[in-house]
Every structure is written in C-alpha cells, then in structure tokens.
Image (cartoon, rainbow, N blue to C red):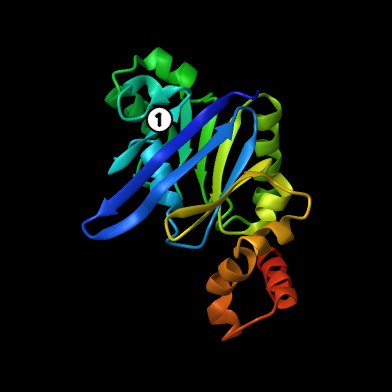
C-alpha cells in the first residue's frame, strides 16, 4: 500500500458563524501529483493554510509526513509552500526562506539543506498568470519532482491542469469534499457525475457567457482559457 504523506482528518474551520470547511477528509499518496479543485471560495486556500499551520482548524487534525501539524513543530522541515499571492513581496527568495527557517529555530546550514529541497510541495494556483513558456517549464518541473519521488498537492480551478498532471484528485465545493480518489480515464464524466464540471465552469465563466451554457460550450471555453 502506498504511503500517505498528507492526511486531513475531519477538519472544519469556522470564522464566527461562517463555516469555511466542513468535516474535510482526504489523503495524498507519496510520489504523486494530487490535484485539489474547486471554484473560488470553496476552501482550497484555507485547507492549504491549515496544512502549513498559517491557519488553525476549529476541529479535526492534519498530518504532514506522519507528523501532526498542530502538535509537532518539525512537520514542516521538508515542506515547500508556494502561496497564490506572495506574503512578503519585498523580500528576496533567499531571504524569505532563511527568515522562515530562523523563525522555526532551524540552523542556517539546515535551512539551506532542507528548504531548497523539500520532499512535499503545496502549491496554491501555481499556473495563475504564467505565460505559455513558463507554464510549460512548470509542467515539466512538477513532473520531474514527482518522478524523483516528491509529492505535490496542487490547488487549481482549471480542469485541464488536472487532466495533464494529476495522478489523484480531490474536489471541494462550499467547504465539503465531494470526491477524492484516483483520476479516472474519463475525467469529464467524473466531474459531471459529481456536479463539478458544469457547476465549476459556470461559476468561473458566468461573466463571460452571461447565462446558462451547455457541456460543449463549457469545454470549449475552458480550452480557450488555457490558450
């Protein structure tokens, strides 16, 4: 059985009366690219923030490399995280990594050895804003990381990213997991069965089409968005 390097178990997150995550559970297998998909506001970024301990869950537990995110500070020594938006845009990459290491009381030598070579990567919408050449470079780099034994959990709202890259997928809608498992050969049918392809695409493209659209139009519009 393949080792699980990320586990989210019955995690909920509330801000006041608003429930952002509702009993979320899924796992990520070692050496795979795991796609995490849902519309904007579904809970993807909150989930990744809990896995990096930037946000604490209201209920439940998350594990990285078999270590509790809430109870074991060493969980993130081999974890790399790329947020959708830079947290400290004025810092250089090296200064940012070193500062993160110092905040965790990791010696500089250990920081340089580990923070530049994580085993587990959390990527929040990594393809947003990339031109085609950089996009292809990132595709190739992610495949290389996986082929060398690395594990990637990648959030995205673009269905074609999953089709090209992911081994497994988890779909989240309004803070609830609606599917988690292997990527099926007929991925469009899987999305349709779980009310994802049509509903996500409609939410993403509502402003462009101005109303209800059928499955063929959804697919064409998603392909156009990628070009």
Crowd class of label 1 (few under 14; some 14 to 19; many from 20; radius 10 Å): some
Counting from the top left corner in percent of width and height, residue 47 is at: 42, 45
Q: Residue at x 50, y 25 (%)?
A: 116
Relative horizontal placement of residue 70, taking residue 160 as reference (left or right):
left
Viewer-proximal residue among 171 and 139 = 171
Farthest residue, direction left: 16
Counting from the top left corner in percent of width and height, residue 221 is at: 68, 73
Q: Quadrant of the N terminus?
A: top right
Farthest residue, direction bottom: 210
Counting from the top left corner in percent of width and height, residue 144 is at: 70, 32
Secondary structure at badge 1 equals helix
Q: Quadrant of the C terminus?
A: bottom right
Counting from the top left corner in percent of width and height, residue 49 is at: 38, 43
Does 14 sit above or below residue 222?
above
Viewer-proximal residue among 65 and 92 = 65
Viewer-proximal residue among 38 and 117 = 38
Q: Which residue is tagged 1?
A: 97
Relative horizontal placement of residue 93, taking residue 225 as reference (left or right):
left
């Amino acid at each position: 059985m393949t080792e699980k390097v990320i586990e989210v178990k019955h995690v909920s997150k509330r801000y006041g009366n608003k429930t952002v995550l509702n009993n979320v559970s899924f796992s990520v297998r070692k050496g795979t690219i795991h796609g995490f998909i849902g519309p904007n506001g579904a809970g993807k970024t909150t989930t990744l923030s809990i896995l990096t301990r930037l946000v604490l869950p209201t209920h439940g537990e998350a594990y990285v490399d078999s270590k509790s995110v809430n109870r074991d500070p060493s969980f993130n020594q081999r974890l790399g995280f790329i947020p959708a938006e830079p947290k400290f845009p004025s810092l250089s990459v090296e200064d940012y990594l070193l500062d993160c290491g110092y905040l965790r009381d990791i010696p500089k030598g250990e920081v340089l050895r580990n923070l530049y070579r994580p085993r587990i990567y959390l990527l929040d919408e990594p393809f947003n804003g990339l031109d085609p050449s950089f996009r292809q470079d990132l595709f190739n780099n992610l495949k290389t990381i996986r082929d060398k034994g690395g594990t990637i959990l990648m959030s995205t709202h673009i269905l074609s990213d999953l089709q090209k890259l992911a081994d497994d997928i988890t779909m989240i809608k309004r803070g609830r997991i609606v599917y988690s498992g292997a990527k099926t050969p007929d991925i469009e049918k899987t999305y349709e069965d779980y009310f994802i392809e049509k509903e996500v695409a409609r939410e993403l493209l509502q402003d462009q089409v101005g109303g209800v659209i059928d499955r063929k139009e959804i697919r064409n519009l998603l392909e156009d968005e990628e070009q």
